[in-house]
């Protein structure tokens, strides 16, 4: 099994969109995928046209077994959802022993090919738990503004996690919200490539049709044409994950 977190301590950079799109891509290619939502906004469920539910809360507090909480949202794709209750976990779990590995231990029994974890925007206990529950991280970066700060913070956090003995590597940095009409987009993208080289994948363009997809409960693959640049960028991300190229 492979485990991948989608993380960047900034909000609104395309984390949830990337998590949902990648999870559905892998499922469509016949892999079994569990998508775990770690954000109290519960957006992952909404992206599939479902209401947010307290799946993560109930799992981590031992209120129900994992198999009762996973919802099959698409063939081969199961969601462990979040809702506002997730915010309470940070304080409830703060006093637990080995509190950074609570999620890793709760997900241990999963037999899927992939576990994809969508994280929230803050550096908190749930974020620490995400890092300890995976061995790979994908960092989406909005190139529309101050792109480097979020990546630098995320990489710094990963370094600390590694220094504490948990092996976790960056699989890809995915530039998002690329806008060909702004100089800022080009400058930020160039800086990213100069700094991080081959880790940086082709950018996902800012796309109105992608923004409207969650409101319709559709994923990118159900709402955008195959030849759309955003579709191609996410197909490229999927190839990086599957082939390492
Ligand atoms: P995060 O999870 O990092 O907060 P989201 O994936 O929720 O970011 O994206 C923030 C908002 O931008 C959402 O409304 C989403 O639908 C929209 N969005 C994501 N990617 C794009 C894109 N490439 N172009 C336009 N809108 C996007
Ligand atoms: Mg999100």
Image: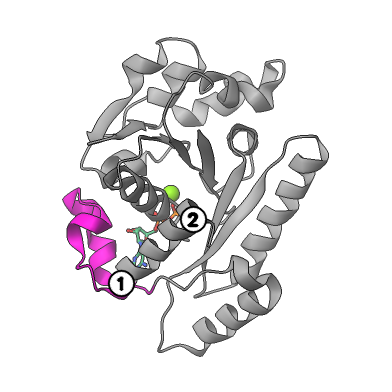
Which of the marked residues, 2 or 1, is nearer the chain's N terminus? 1
Callout 1: few (<14), some (14-19), or many (20+) C-alpha neighbours within 10 Å?
some
Return the residue at label 1: 207
Outermost residue on the front side: it is 243
**In the foreground, 116 or 17:** 116
Q: Can the viewer see residue 39 in this picture?
A: no
Secondary structure under the numbered disc 1 in the rendered image:
loop
Asked if residue 224 lies in the magenta stretch, the reply is yes
Residue at (22% x, 36% y) in the render: 75
| 155 with respect to 172 (left or right) | right
Q: Position of residue 106 (x, y in %)?
A: 53, 19
Residue at (25% x, 52% y) in the render: 219
Return the residue at label 2: 243
**In the foreground, 237 or 7:** 237
180 relative to 82, above or below: below
**Residue stretch rendered in magenta on the structure:** 205-229
Question: Any atom of ligand 1 within 8 Å of the CB at mark 1?
Answer: yes
**Which corner quadrant of the image does residue 223 belong to?**
bottom left
């Amino acid at each position: 099994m492979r485990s991948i977190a989608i993380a960047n301590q900034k909000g609104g950079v395309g984390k949830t969109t990337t998590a949902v799109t990648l999870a559905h891509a892998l499922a469509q290619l016949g892999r079994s995928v569990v998508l775990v939502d770690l954000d109290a906004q519960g957006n992952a469920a909404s992206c599939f046209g479902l209401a947010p539910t307290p799946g993560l809360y109930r799992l981590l507090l031992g209120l129900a077994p994992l198999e009762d909480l996973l919802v099959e949202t698409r063939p081969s794709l199961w969601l462990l959802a979040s809702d506002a209750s997730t915010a309470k976990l940070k304080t409830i779990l703060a006093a637990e022993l080995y509190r950074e590995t609570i999620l890793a231990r709760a997900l241990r029994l999963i037999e899927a090919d992939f576990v994809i974890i969508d994280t929230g925007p803050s550096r908190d206990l749930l974020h620490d738990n995400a890092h300890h529950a995976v061995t790979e991280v994908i960092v989406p970066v909005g190139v529309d503004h101050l792109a480097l700060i979020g990546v630098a913070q995320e990489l710094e956090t990963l370094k600390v996690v590694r220094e504490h003995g948990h092996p976790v590597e960056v699989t890809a940095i995915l530039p998002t919200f690329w806008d060909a009409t702004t100089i800022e987009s080009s400058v930020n993208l160039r800086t990213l490539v100069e700094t991080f080289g081959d880790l940086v994948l082709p950018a996902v363009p800012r796309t109105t049709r992608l923004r409207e997809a969650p409101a319709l409960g559709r994923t990118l693959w159900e709402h955008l044409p195959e030849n759309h640049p955003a579709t191609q960028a996410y197909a490229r991300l999927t190839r990086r994950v599957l082939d390492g190229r």
